[in-house]
Image: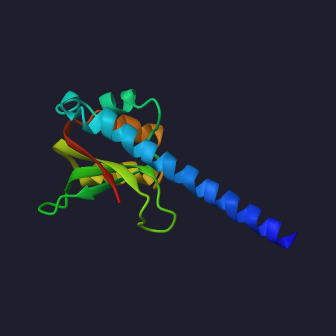
Amino acid sequence: MKKICKITVVLLLFILSIKIHAQQIDTLQYLKETFEAKKADYIGKPFSCILNKMDKIYPQSVFSMPSVYNITLTEVTKFYFILPKQGLGKNVIYIYIKWETPIPTKDVDNTEKIDKSGFTPEKKVFYGSKIVKDLKIIKM
């Protein structure tokens, strides 16, 4: 009886891990096909064009990085779709956006103070008006 219980638990965990992996592949495939493959449709347009097109998945969090050459400006923002469980992990998928006009870091910091991790309606409005220079879908 104990063997049957152990086998059942192992089998359920195996099925669950396959389902989670399939979901990540679907997320990656959806983002690559919908946005990266058609990035010419989004370059030079507000980020809201991308957000409005997202009907299957939505960013869970956001992280902006100041410029290496001028820390008062933010040139790049990452919008995360699958969050790492502890720190940076293997199952992280994000859309990397380079902005046409760098955003003042103080404005980004003020927006981040609203909710440090989540992608809130305020962040949607803030980033939605920014013009996209380039985008990439990245899986770590």
Rendered image coloring scheme: rainbow
Relative to 16, say whether 7 is above or below. below
Q: Is residue 47 above or below residue 77?
A: above
Q: Residue at horizontal 77%, vertical 69%? A: 6
Residue beneath the point at 81% across and 71% down: 3
Q: Residue at x 36, y 40 (%)?
A: 31
Please indicate whether residue 49 sits to the left or right of residue 98 in the image: right
Measured as percent of width and height from the top left, residue 46 is found at 25, 31
Tell me if 22 is positioned left or right of 3 in this view.
left
Instruction: Find residue 4 and report its image quarter.
Output: bottom right
**Residue 4 or residue 97, whichever sits in front:** 4
41 vs 3, nearest the viewer: 3
Q: Could you tell me which residue is drawn at 31 percent across and 28 percent down?
A: 49
Vertical position of residue 67 compared to residue 33: above or below: below
Q: Position of residue 125 (x, y in %)?
A: 38, 34
Q: Quadrant of residue 123?
A: top left
Horizontal side, residue 15 vs residue 27: left or right: right
